Image (spheres, rainbow, N blue to C red):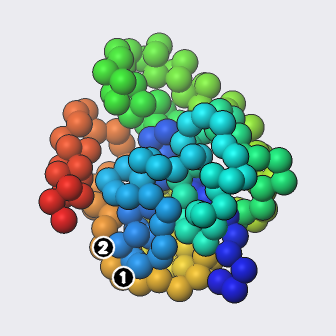
Amino acid sequence: MADPVNIFVAGLGRCGTTMVMTMLDRGGFPVGDVAPDYETFTPMVAGKVTAEALAPLRGKAVKWLDPTVSIAPAGTRAISIWLDRDFTEQAKSQLKLCSAPTSRRAVRAVAATLRTDSIRARKIVAACGPILPMSFEQILAQPLVEAKRIRDFLGNFDVVRAAATVRRRGPECLPDMMLEARLLREALNG
């Protein structure tokens, strides 16, 4: 990239942003934060974001969680990957992460909120520049194909290494936090 731009990996929580950040990182694409969650220093995760905070991150992929809450400064130009996930499974995952009850009623309520917020958040991201829409389910099903789509959108990185980071599994929300705990241990151990 001759003139670095902001690069965002955006979505609403539990949609696959960390998985994509890991793919980019392990594939050799510059990222603006550290594993395992890529949320340590990134100003786009929560709170007020300033142009000064974004400046040193240009040319690096940065996670942007819930663009309806963490608003980009006016005039921010970026290229972004937007992640979607089946709203019911995403709702279950969010509730599980918060240790909240996962009754059908709670899942339906969170899924409805995600559906509404996703439309608004995606428009906010798209206002910054071009977006590559992706789905959590498709990345799990065809990680190499999806890694190539990312490479074609963002620029060169090792798609084979990136795809190898994706854990083969079904797209449904797992009943416990074992996968998350294992990924955290692996990230911390090297």
Tell me if 102 is positioned left or right of 63 in this view: left
Q: Residue 37: where, in percent of width, then height?
A: 37, 50
| Dot 1 amino acid type | Val
Can the viewer see residue 134?
no
Who's the residue at 56% across and 36% down the image?
46
Q: Is residue 130 among the parts visible in the rendering?
A: yes
Q: Which residue is mark 2?
A: 164
Q: Where the N terminus falls, by quadrant?
A: bottom right
Q: Residue at x 42, y 31 (%)?
A: 94
Specify the quadrant of the image occupied by residue 80.
Answer: bottom right
Number of numbered discs present? 2
The C terminus: image quadrant: bottom left
Dots 2, 1 in contact, CB < 8 A: yes
Image location of residue 68, percent across then percent down: 69, 35
- Residue 160: image tag: 1
Q: Amino acid at mark 2?
A: Ala
SS for dot 1: helix
Per the image, label 2 sits on a secondary structure element best described as: helix
Q: Quadrant of residue 77?
A: bottom right
- Please give the name of the residue rendered at 63% of the width and 52% of the height, measured from the top-left corner: 53
How would you rate the neighbour count of disc 1 (Cα within 10 Å): few for under 14, some for 14-19, many for 20 or more?
some
Residue 42, given in percent of the width and then of the height, sits at 52, 50
> Compared to 149, does 72 lie above or below?
above
Residue at left 28%, top 39%? Answer: 174
Report the side of 34 relative to 105 (left or right). left
Coordinates of residue 45 in the picture (x, y in percent): 54, 42
- Give the side of residue 77 with respect to residue 10, left or right: right
112 or 164, which lies in front? 164
